Amino acid sequence: MWWTHLKNASVESIVARVLYELVRIPSPPGREKECALKFREYAVRFGLNSWIDSTNSVYATLPNAKRRASILLAGHIDTIEGFLEPRISGLAVHGRGAVDAKGPLVSMLLALYALKEERVECPVALAALSGEEGESAGARNLVSKGSVPPYIIIGEPTNLTNVVIGYRGSVKVHITCAGKGGHPSSPWIGDSALDRLLELVDALRRAFPGTSSKEVTFSITRLVAGESTRSLPARAECYVDFRVPLGMSARELVSRLLQEIGGLDRNCSMTFLSFEEPFYVKPQSLVPRSLVRGIIGLGMKPSLAIKAGTSDMNVLGPYAKSIAAYGPGDSRLAHSTCEEISVNEVLKAARVYLEAVRFLCKKAEEDIAVELPV
């Protein structure tokens, strides 16, 4: 093992250090290169073949294997914006991306290393995909090149015992409103663009009052209005993130939006920025079954789950034979200011991934491996 020169170092402390080194490098969408290079460095130290593609996604395969795969461990190297000071506290790693999703990524790296040590011959690969928190550049590159393997495990925090078989979809919208402005002392004769925008938001709340993942919900993620505190805003804009439940398509939601608020105010306009369809996989399909077996093998009780958000599973799922998401970490801490993950969870998840891949290797022998991007 590459770390044998470290005297008196436990496996836990080494894994903590590897994760810490990845977490301390900021890697928001579009700026993953430095972290990608570090992850590739670790993959090579683990004795794996590794390379970085044109989207700054990192791939790794077993030694002497071709750059092909029928089974893909697919995590993501990027995180949301917002740096958090990284630190190791006992056997926990704190920092941006510790939970979402560099912790699961390290678990996948450990699983692939274990397969190498066992001299397993199987067309399995690991991908640290770029842009998952943005426009899913790495995953979409796989799709565009026809390089989606038939069996995929998505690395996301699922609280160690949950196997995620479905994600809601999303529709992201930019709304702008214009007004003539005016003096703040006389709002009744002025024309505030912000007031127009807030009226539209109120209309949205009446049209989409959902409060659970089984309904349409929305969040305002950014709102900007005015240029001065001494005048009514002549321009206002906001970004709205709609989530689409299973059983409804993103197109249906767009139609409803146009019906509900499309003609409410001619001084406001709505631009659709992105669409992501919901995705669901049958629990009896091969990848969910493999993960359930792995969890049971560790003496834990598995559960099937539907996630309220989206992931690269929405992008890759329609092109895969079977897919599911799994990983260490408390998903409630993702995107928060208190991201932290237990190293013991990272190690347990690695064992689940390992057992799942062993199972898939036996079942996927007849499936054609696809060429991975370079």
Image: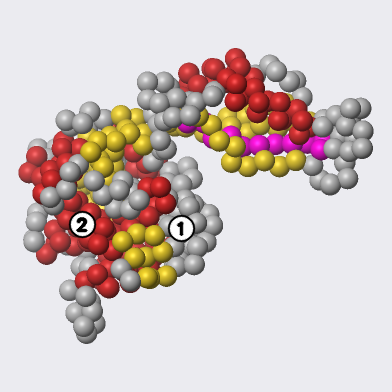
Q: Give the residues in magenta.
A: 233-243
Specify the principal SS of the magenta part: strand
Query: For the point 33% across and 47% down, which residue is it?
Result: 156
How many other residues sit within 10 Å of disc 1, few (<14), some (14-19) or many (≥20)? some
Question: Which residue corresponds to the image point at 27% horizontal and 68% vertical from the top-left?
Answer: 15
Residue at 18% of width from left, 62% of height from top? 113
Q: How many marks?
A: 2
Q: Quadrant of the N terminus?
A: bottom left
Would you call the spot at circle 2 few (<14 residues within 10 Å), some (14-19), or many (20 or more)? some
Q: Secondary structure at mark 2?
A: helix
Front residue of this view, candidates 64 and 205 = 205
Does residue 114 appear left or right of residue 255 in this picture? left
Image quadrant where residue 18 sits:
bottom left
Residue 10, labelled with which disc?
Answer: none
Residue 81, percent from left and from top? 53, 54
Image height of 191 relative to 8, above or below: above
What x and y, as percent, mark residue 331?
37, 47
Quarter of the rendering containing residue 321 = top left
Residue 338, numbered circle: 1
Q: Which residue is mark 2?
A: 348
Indicate whether 100 appears above or below 174: below
